[in-house]
Structures are given as structure tokens and as C-alpha cells.
Image: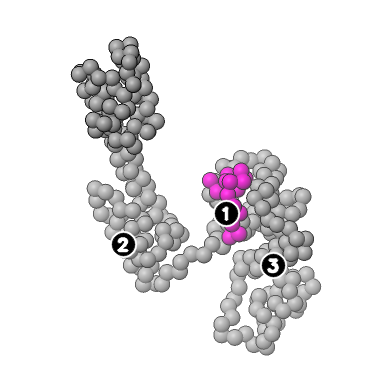
Amino acid sequence: MCGAEKNIFGWFPRLHVCDKCGRVLFHDKPSSQDENFTSHELWLSHAVYALIHKVTKNRIIITSDVVSNALTRILETQKITVLEFSKLVQCDTRMLRRLINKEKRPYLPSILDICYRLDIPPDKLFFDRDILTCSENWKTHPREKYIDMSKLTKRKRTDLLKALQSALTTSATIPIRVSHIASRFNIRTSTIRYNFPEEYSILTARRSAWEKTVWRNQHQARLEKLVEGIFSLARVGVYPSERKLRDLNYMLPSDLRREDVKHLLGAFQDVYKSLWPGGD
């Protein structure tokens, strides 16, 4: 095939696979469907095979405890925090915390992604006592991911970029959601984030800022409505109880269950209890 000699200890511990090009050795000539494998794909193939071999041979189950203990050993060995670790390997901090705290079920593509960045196979990370890796070998660029992403055609990519740029230049009162653009092209939001990270960041930041402003205004209006209802009841000599505020449509039942409303209403009720001892 490629002229490489079969090594005893190669990337692929399988006799039917070429260590150099990664093709199957059953054919004398590579078929038109064969592809040139990258070093990332070679690493992935070997890592998956070694992990399956280890788990099958020793009858081991990879649980949340196994993943948590492995990541904890890395943090203790390197003497770094979860936040520092996530920045070094360019991984999501929340995901790492949930894995370490055993709150998240281990997901194989994410685990492989972390192992690739740490430059250590998953079977070594999970089942070896020592962590044979150091931060100098950790990969932060390029950011390889072994999670399936929707492939975009050239035309679809061009049309999607035009839609994103149009959304960026349009000064709409309500910023458009990235999910709306994704649904228009029948793709996932993660596909936009993966292929157009800059446009995605700007649009999401703009939408987030608008939502925070709306929430702040709604919060202020809710408290003002509560105060107005309390004083309206007080003027006619009625104790401002939750039931009265709800029955007279001063406040919605859902708003009365909010913590900020409860605290403010409780403060007013403490003041008025001396005036209405029998208030409910």
C-alpha cells in the first residue's frame, strides 16, 4: 500500500491495519473510498481500541467515580484549580465541575476530547495510578473535537454567513436569537458556534444584554406594582396579605412566589402587623 513495514509496536495494535497510513491491509491497492488519516484520527483510533481492550479484558465499568477520580488526580498533581485547568485545555468549566462532582454522566466524545488535549489515552488516564502527563504537553490549539458537527455545504455556509452578517448590521429593537437563524437553515445552534464563533459570540452577547435589560425592567415593574397594591389596601384599612393581593388582582400568583416579592412583602407586613393585629 504505502510501502511502510509492519512494526511490532505501532499506533495500531491490530495486524490488519497499516501503522503509517491507517488503511486496511486486505487489499493490494487502496480503493477510491480510502482516505488519508490525520494524526488526530490515528490517535483517536488507537485510544478507542486500547480503552475497549482494557475494559473488556479486565471487565471494568467506567462510572462517574472513575472519571471524577482521574480528573481530581490531575488537579492535585498539577496543583491547579478547575478554572485554571479548563482555561489550559480550553474546555467548558461547568462540564468539568460536574464531572468532578459526579453530577454528570461521562460522555465518551467529551472524555476523548479531554484526553486528547491532555495528551494521554483514556485507558491510561482512568486505570493507571500515576498521571503520566504534564501541562507542557497539553494541547490548546488547534481545538480538536470528536463530537459530531453538522457539515455545511459551501453554498449553505455562504448563505448562513450572509444571514449572520445581516443580523449583525441590523439595528432591531429586539435582537434575534441565534437559534432562530439555526432553525431557518435546519441546523443546530452548536453548528453556528463551531463554524462562526466570532459572529455567534457577538449575537449571543447582544441578545443576553437585551434580555438582562428586559428582566431588570420587569423586576422593577413587579416591585412597583406590589408596593402600589400594598398601599391601596392600606388606604382602605385592609391588611396586605398575599390572599388579598391575589384575589384583588394586584399581583399574579406566580409573582407572589418569587423570593424578592416575598421579602419585600414580608417587610411591609412586619410594619403593618401592629396596626392590624388580626391580619391573615
Q: Which residue is mark 3?
A: 49
> Can see residue 219?
yes
Q: Which residue is mark 1?
A: 140
Amino acid type shown at disc 3: Tyr
Numbered disc 2: secondary structure: helix
3 above or below 50? below
| Pair 2/1: label in front | 2
Foreground: 54 or 130?
54
Rendering coords of residue 140 (x, y %): 57, 54
Kindly report the distance in space between the C-alpha atoms of the residues bearing marks 3 and 2: 42 Å
Asked if marks 3 and 1 touch (Cβ < 8 Å), the reply is no
| Pair 3/2: label in front | 3
Numbered disc 3: secondary structure: helix
Horizontally, residue 165 falls left or right of residue 147, namely left
Horizontally, residue 232 falls left or right of residue 191, namely left
Amino acid type shown at disc 1: Thr
Rendering coords of residue 268 (x, y %): 32, 19
Of labels 3 and 1, earlier in sequence is 3
6 above or below 72? below
Numbered disc 1: secondary structure: loop
Magenta stretch, residue numbers: 94-109
Asked whether 108 falls inside the magenta stretch, the response is: yes
Q: Which residue is mark 2?
A: 163
Amino acid type shown at disc 2: Ala
